[in-house]
Image (tube, rainbow, N blue to C red):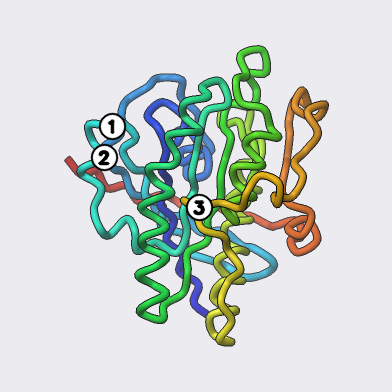
Amino acid sequence: MDDKISITICGDGGCGKSSITLRIVRSAWTHDYDPTIEDSYSVTRTINGQTYSLHLTDTAGQEEYRGMWSAANLTSDAFLLVYDITNAQSLQNLDFFAELIEMEKENRQEQGRCWPAIMVAGNKCDLQGQRQVGAAEGLEWAKSRGCGFMETSAREVVNIEETFASIVKRVVEAREQHASGMRPDFPSLINPTPHNQRASAVPETQQSAPAPNITSDAEKQRYSQSESTATSPQKKKKK
């Protein structure tokens, strides 16, 4: 079994991509905002008894840096799309990254390669008083595009490990389907299912939960609690 998994983390600047990354790598959090161009880290995690080596790439979110996105970022096994629940525009801006990933999916299909796993994280869920994006809205955006979904808080350590465990399991599932000749049943990222055909989202009454942990019902049945172990990170800065 291939135990190496590459994950590209993308989203608007200031949405907490680096904070999530540093939580998973160093179990640390910082409130200082230092715009990232690109940082790379390596960690290990044990999921369902299998140890995986994760290569994480924390990418630039600022619009002026998006042209620096390298083709290598799109070759990842998985993508984590992060938005800020206190900034409604940050969810809409995920469309930019979704379009890039959709083109990559089409390329992989033509070349007979495995599709990437995709997870959406609504970050800063500890800031309930400043919320602009309801949990139901984020879930609907993700589910209509075939993505997994969780709300996270890097500051309060909510669903950080769980998010990456889910990503690993989705990658493993995609690889198994590819090996068996099955095509993953993922909707288009840029032409999602029509509104009246979408699966129902989480009721609005659940949006006020202090630590929401939201995935699809199917995902809840598939995935069990994961076991995690961290190792020292390796960081590379590109300028």
Q: Is residue 219 left or right of residue 110?
A: right
Q: Which residue is mark 1?
A: 63
Residue sitting farthest toward the left: 239
**Element assignment for label 1:** helix
Instruction: Say if 214 sits above or below 55 in the image.
Output: above
Q: Which residue is mark 3?
A: 191
Q: CA distance from mark 2 to mark 3?
A: 22 Å
Instruction: Check disc 2 and give the amino acid type.
Output: Arg
Q: Depth check: give the residue in front, 105 or 128.
A: 105
- Percent position of residue 195, x then y: 66, 44
Name the mark nearer the viewer: 3 or 1. 3
Instruction: Check disc 1 and give the amino acid type.
Output: Glu
Q: Are marks 2 and 3 in contact (CB under 8 Å)?
A: no
Q: Is residue 86 left or right of residue 32?
A: right
Q: Depth check: give the residue in front, 218 or 163.
A: 218
Give whichever of discs 3 and 1 has the lower sequence position.
Answer: 1
- Percent position of residue 81, x then y: 48, 44
Q: Residues within 10 Å of mark 1 (few under 14, many from 20)?
A: few
Instruction: Say if 117 sits above or below 63 in the image.
Output: below
Residue found 58% across the figure and 71% down from its top: 184
Q: CA distance from mark 3 to mark 1?
A: 23 Å
Residue found 53% across the figure and 66% down from its top: 52
Q: Depth check: give the residue in front, 116 or 30.
A: 116
- Residue 66 has which mark? 2
Q: Depth check: give the residue in front, 167 or 87.
A: 87
**Element assignment for label 2:** helix
Residue found 66% across the figure and 12% down from its top: 129
Q: Which of the 4 image quarters holds residue 221? A: bottom right
Give whichever of discs 2 and 3 has the lower sequence position.
Answer: 2
